Image (cartoon, grey):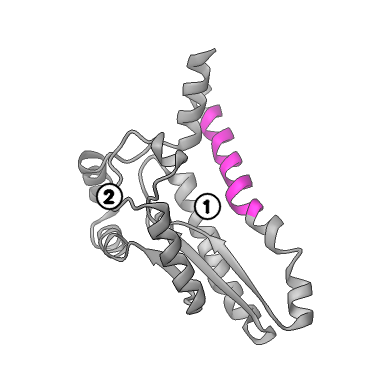
């Protein structure tokens, strides 16, 4: 029963941060951008938005929500001179990824990731997704294999992370 409450709480916290956080940040800015007929909104999603990772249901769902929202918002605001880009990175070396205890395919330095993001924004690429090879492999894998088989294979071959918030809670409760 406690695990169920943890999953519910972690899921709600993740949606509040990843989805509501995006809305709370950009929605107040849109009227002014539309009025002056210019502006740029960059929304941070994730490569995880392209498929369903076992153990990361809420994370994948939130990132898919903001990616899709950003793609639709781009079309909605285009005639008003407001540009929208959605960034969908894979793993980037950071304090957050240092805590991961699983294989992170395609992990790259912050400098490399920033270079890719900056170049994509400068070219006004609608969805900046990288590393490209991983996006292609992951997208194909998620869509070609039946969901049951894909999940079994992913659990065996790729150390798919458990929900970050659940892991953080468990680790913090152990320290007490």
Q: Residue at x 53, y 28 (%)?
A: 6
Alpha-carbon neighbours of circle 1 within 10 Å: few (<14), some, or many (≥20)? many
Outermost front residue: 111
Q: Is residue 1 visible?
A: no
| Disc 1 element | helix
Q: Residue at x 52, y 18 (%)?
A: 173
Q: Which residue is mark 2?
A: 105
Left/right of residue 5 with respect to residue 116 in the rendered view: right
Q: Residue 125: image x %, image y %?
A: 47, 76
Q: Are marks 1 and 2 in contact (CB under 8 Å)?
A: no
Left/right of residue 141 with respect to residue 51 in the rendered view: left
| Disc 2 element | loop
Left/right of residue 25 with respect to residue 114 in the rendered view: right
Q: Which residue is mark 1?
A: 62
Q: Residue at x 32, y 50 (%)?
A: 107
Q: Residue 149: image x %, image y %?
A: 23, 49
Label the magenta part by its dominant secondary structure: helix
Picture layout, residue 3 above or below residue 104: above
Observer-nearest of 66 and 8: 66
Alpha-carbon neighbours of circle 2 within 10 Å: few (<14), some, or many (≥20)? few
Picture layout, residue 86 above or below residue 23: below
Please tell me whether residue 68 belongs to the stretch shown in magenta: no
Observer-nearest of 115 and 19: 115
Mark sitting earlier along the chain (1/2): 1
Cα separation, mark 1 vs mark 2, equals 21 Å
């Amino acid at each position: 029963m406690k695990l169920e409450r943890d999953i519910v709480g972690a899921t709600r916290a993740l949606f509040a941060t990843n989805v509501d956080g995006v809305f709370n940040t950009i929605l107040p800015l849109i009227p002014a951008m539309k009025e002056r007929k210019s502006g740029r909104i960059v929304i941070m999603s994730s490569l995880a938005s392209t498929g369903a990772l076992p153990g990361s249901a809420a994370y994948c769902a939130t990132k898919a929500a903001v990616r899709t929202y950003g793609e639709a918002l781009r079309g909605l605001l285009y005639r008003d001179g407001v540009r929208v880009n959605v960034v969908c990175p894979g793993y980037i070396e950071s304090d957050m990824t240092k805590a991961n205890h699983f294989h992170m395919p395609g992990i790259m330095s912050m400098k490399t990731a920033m270079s890719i993001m900056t170049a994509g924004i400068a070219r006004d690429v609608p969805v900046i997704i990288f590393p490209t090879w991983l996006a292609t492999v992951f997208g194909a894998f998620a869509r070609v294999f039946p969901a049951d088989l894909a999940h079994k294979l992913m659990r065996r071959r790729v150390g798919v992370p458990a929900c970050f918030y659940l892991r953080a809670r468990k680790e913090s409760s152990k320290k007490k």
